[in-house]
Image (cartoon, grey):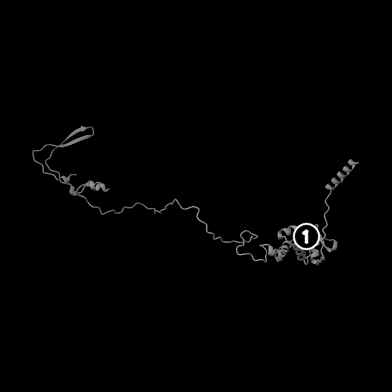
């Protein structure tokens, strides 16, 4: 007997699982009676709506709310729950059909004094001066922050940039220079090129004979031959 009962239960469970689920019928327990206009009735019937118990029209298992009762019914539901517009919309979407359902829920939530007194984001309660609004879109509420922030790092390495104008080299005067007749070495120490002034030259004496002698393969020694005449004394400062 036990096995027969178990087999019967298994067969019924199998048939129930394989069969299509029965759509639940939703009944709205409210003292309000629906009143659809002719235009609303035609539009709902065009979408597949059917009138059922107590005059309500159902569309795909949802109750179609008439326009004259939508705000009143949503207000009654909100007064019993006092939840946010997003949560209330998620709760009523599977139950009711109304094209402007999210807008009506938002309007009812803004008009609720209880939600405005408790929720800082309410539409009646004015936010404080330091209250940051959440907003619904990025960049909807911008605020400037004047908080002083100390420097984290300081400048250590500096780079000097100098703009040099490109151009060709040109000669320019760097003088005046002082001509030193005493010794050309002093002029060389000043960075000037070697030069010989005209005052440092003298005419070579006449009647002097010179002799040459090869000292090496690349060296030649010049010597003045002895003369019987006495040469004129030369100025030590006039030598080259």
When asked about the image quadrant of residue 119, the answer is bottom right
Q: Residue 21 at what x, y percent from top left?
A: 83, 51
Quadrant, the C terminus: top left
Q: Residue 158 at what x, y percent from top left?
A: 43, 52
Looking at the image, which residue is at 20% across and 32% down?
Answer: 215
Residue occupying the far front of the picture: 118
Q: Is 75 in front, or is 128?
A: 128
Q: Residue 211 at what x, y percent from top left?
A: 15, 36
When asked about the image quadrant of residue 57, the answer is bottom right
Quadrant, the N terminus: top right
Q: Residue 213 at what x, y percent from top left?
A: 18, 33
Mark 1 highlights which residue?
96
Q: Is 17 in front, or is 129?
A: 129
Judged from the image, the secondary structure of the residue bearing numbered disc 1 is strand
Q: Is 78 in front, or is 185?
A: 78
Looking at the image, which residue is at 72% across and 58% down?
Answer: 87
- In the image, taking residue 29 as reference, residue 149 lies left or right, namely left
CA neighbours of label 1 inside 10 A, class few (<14), some (14 to 19), many (20+): some
Q: Is 143 in front, or is 174?
A: 143
- In the image, taking residue 89 as reference, residue 180 lies left or right, namely left
């Amino acid at each position: 007997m036990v096995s027969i009962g178990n087999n019967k239960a298994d067969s019924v469970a199998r048939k129930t699982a394989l069969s299509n689920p029965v759509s639940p019928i939703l009944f709205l327990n409210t003292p309000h009676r629906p009143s659809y206009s002719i235009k609303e009735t035609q539009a709902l019937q065009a979408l597949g709506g059917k009138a059922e118990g107590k005059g309500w029209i159902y569309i795909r298992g949802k109750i179609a709310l008439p326009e004259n009762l939508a705000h009143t019914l949503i207000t009654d539901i909100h007064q019993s729950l006092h939840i946010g517009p997003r949560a209330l919309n998620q709760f009523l979407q599977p139950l009711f059909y109304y094209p402007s359902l999210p807008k009506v829920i938002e309007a009812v939530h803004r008009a609720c004094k209880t939600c405005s007194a408790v929720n800082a984001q309410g539409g009646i309660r004015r936010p404080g001066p330091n209250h940051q609004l959440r907003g619904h879109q990025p960049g909807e509420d911008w605020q400037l922050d004047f908080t002083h922030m100390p420097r984290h790092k300081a400048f250590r390495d500096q780079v000097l940039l100098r703009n040099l104008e490109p151009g060709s080299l040109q000669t320019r005067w760097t003088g005046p220079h002082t001509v030193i007749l005493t010794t050309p070495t002093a002029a060389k120490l000043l960075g000037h090129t070697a030069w010989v002034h005209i005052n440092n030259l003298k005419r070579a004496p006449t009647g002097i004979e010179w002799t040459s002698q090869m000292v090496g393969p690349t060296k030649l020694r010049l010597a003045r031959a002895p003369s019987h005449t006495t040469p004129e004394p030369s100025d030590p400062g006039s030598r080259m």
